[in-house]
Amino acid sequence: MKQTSLALDLSQRRTRKRVLLDEMEQVVPWAQLLALIEPHTPVAPTGRPPFALSAMLRIHFMQQCFGLSDLAMEEALFDTPMYRDFAGLDGMARLPDRLSILRFRHLLEHHRLAEQFLSVVNQQLAAKGYLLKEGTAIDASLIAAPTSTNNQSGKRDPEMHSTKKGHQWHFGMKAHIGVDADSALVHTVVGTAANVSDVTAVRL
């Protein structure tokens, strides 16, 4: 009697994360976003060469899409080949650590580049016929930050604060996200300390 194998064929399997990264690859105007960052990138005078801007930008997008802290993103790059491949780091001898990821995010925050990114992406969506409408739903996502003071300054990040959600305390920041109610497209993102209320952020 011939036995039928019940094993799953994983050779063509595409997970939801893989699908999301593939769609991001096609939709995000990477070259335009890199052009916004390049004028603000400091030149390292000595030491190891910095990681490519394209890699750090892709890491930043993955971090936001999957809700990963700096430490979690660092570990994900080591553990998940799919993430390294998307960032163009597969086969590299070294990978960005949490401090590199943090410095890149601070670079974007200092020059308010996230708002410019969103504007460029929205223009691209509008050009393709995905028009944002007036109805908006507001959501807020907590982004964890290290609570330890075991660093060079001996202090926590002064821009981060604590907030209570349910019965649990969180330390970090909060992303207030405005979403078009009909198309579900994100049109506004405002980052604040975690203790800023959603109602306050709506007015920002």
Image (cartoon, helix red, strand yellow):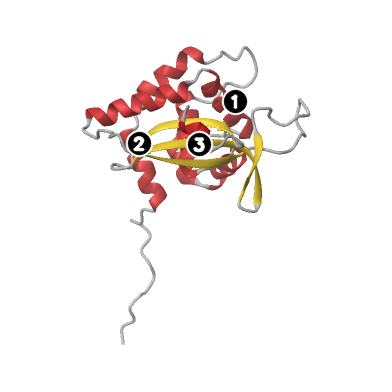
Q: Amino acid at mark 3?
A: Val
Residue 129 placement: quadrant: top left
Q: Secondary structure at mark 3?
A: helix
Ranked by sequence position, the earlier of labels 2 and 1 is 2
Measuring from the top left, give residue 101's x and y in whole percent. 57, 31
Q: Amino acid at mark 1?
A: Arg
The one of 95 and 172 positioned closer to us in this rendering: 172
Rate crowding at label 1 as few (under 14), some (14 to 19) or many (20 or more) other CA atoms within 10 Å.
few
Q: Nearer the viewer, mark 2 or mark 3?
A: 3
Measuring from the top left, give residue 118's x and y in whole percent. 39, 27
Instruction: Name the residue beneath numbered marker 2.
Output: 25
Rate crowding at label 3 as few (under 14), some (14 to 19) or many (20 or more) other CA atoms within 10 Å.
few
Q: Which mark is residue 103?
A: 1
The image shows residue 9, relative to residue 117, as above or below, that is below
The one of 173 and 57 positioned closer to us in this rendering: 173
- Alpha carbons under labels 2 and 1: distance apart: 24 Å
- Residue at position x 35%, y 32% from top? 28
Measuring from the top left, give residue 12's x and y in whole percent. 33, 56
Instruction: Name the residue beneath numbered marker 3.
Output: 199
Q: Secondary structure at mark 1?
A: helix
Q: Amino acid at mark 2?
A: Glu
Q: Nearer the viewer, mark 3 or mark 1?
A: 3
Q: Which mark is residue 155?
A: none
- Residue at position x 65%, y 53% from top? 167
Q: Secondary structure at mark 2?
A: helix
- Alpha carbons under labels 2 and 3: distance apart: 34 Å
